[in-house]
Every structure is written in structure tokens, then in C-alpha cells.
Image (cartoon, rainbow, N blue to C red):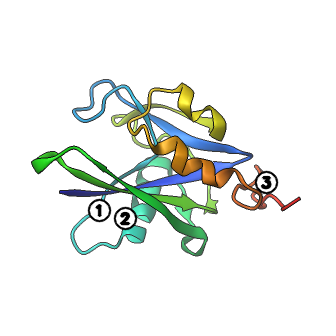
Amino acid sequence: MHLVVTGALVENGAVLLVHRSPTRRAYPDLWDLPGGHVDPGESELQALAREMHEELGVRIVAESSSRLGELRLGSGDNAVHLCVWHVGDWVGSPTNCAPDEHDDMAWVGIHELGDLPLVHGDLPALVRALAGPGRSRRRDGTPTAAP
């Protein structure tokens, strides 16, 4: 079983998604959260920090990150245990630093996730929990306030 982490960066009520290149072996031409495999000896949070830097060029603020949930995909040797994390704060502007893996990226409204072809059908339900006050940051980097 492969252990994979993904990060939900949420800003102004939108989550950052990456579009998997049509040439990818696994889940081509679908939208997904950025992330990747956990290397041996690495914690989920360490892998999340590494993947966000490699794929998006951002440094996550570890203290702002929390585990949202997990999904299981596939079976046998191809089974994937996917751990979804909320990244509450980061340093830098996300850019596509892995064009061989992703051919596009976009901020998508949390309530619009169901309109896209996603790698994981359960992803919208997990991410909707982030739509509440204080779970998103504004473009200026400050958290949204509770009403």
C-alpha cells in the first residue's frame, strides 16, 4: 500500500487544485489536491511540507496544518492510503513548479468542487468542512474572521 499526503490550501473560500497531466500513469487528466508519496522515515507532515515546496514553491506553516481525513483507493499492490491535510498558512505564492506532473492549477470555490472531474469523488465532502469562518485565509495572508 502506498501512503500519500495531499494539502488543501484555502484562500478566500477557494481551494487550490492541480490538474494532473494527461500523460500521467495514475489518474491522468483529473483535478486533485497537490501532494505526493510519503518517503520511508518521513512523517506525514514532513512529506506534506516537502511536496508543497516541490510542487508549488511554498513553505507551509506546520503549526497551521491539521489532518482533515483519509481516503483509500484501489486494491492490492496499487492500493493508496491518502491522507488529506488542511494547510492554514504558507509562505510564498503558489506556482506550478512541477509542470511534468501538472499542466494547470486553479483556485476553485469549495462549493464548486463537484463540478470538476476529480481524482477522488469524496474530496468535496472532506474539503467542505473548510468553508467555515476562520478556516480560509485572505489574499493578504490574514485569516478570515468569524461573523
User: Residue type at mark 1?
Assistant: Val
Dot in front, 3 or 1 = 1
Where 138 falls versus 59 (above or below)?
above
| Residue 109 in view, yes or no | no
Q: Residue furthest right?
A: 147
Q: In this view, does 53 lie to the left or right of 131?
A: left
Residue at horizontal 62 percent and vertical 32 percent from the top? 112
- Residue for badge 2: 47
Q: How crowded is mark 1: few (under 14 residues within 10 Å), some or many (20 or more)?
A: some
Numbered label attached to residue 123: none
* Circle 2: element type: helix
Sequence-wise first label, 3 or 1: 1
Q: How crowded is mark 3: few (under 14 residues within 10 Å), some or many (20 or more)?
A: few
* Circle 3: element type: loop
Residue at horizontal 45 percent and vertical 43 percent from the top? 122
Where 9 falls versus 43 (above or below)?
above
User: Residue type at mark 3?
Assistant: Asp
Sequence-wise first label, 2 or 3: 2
Q: Where is residue 11 in the image (x, y as percent from the top left)?
A: 69, 49
Q: Distance between the residues labelled 2 and 3?
A: 26 Å
Q: How far apart are marks 3 and 1 (CA)?
A: 31 Å
Q: How crowded is mark 2: few (under 14 residues within 10 Å), some or many (20 or more)?
A: many
Where 40 falls versus 97 (above or below)?
below
- Residue for badge 1: 38
Q: In this view, does 32 lie to the left or right of 129?
A: left
* Circle 1: element type: loop
- Residue for badge 3: 140
Residue at horizontal 62 percent and vertical 35 percent from the top? 108
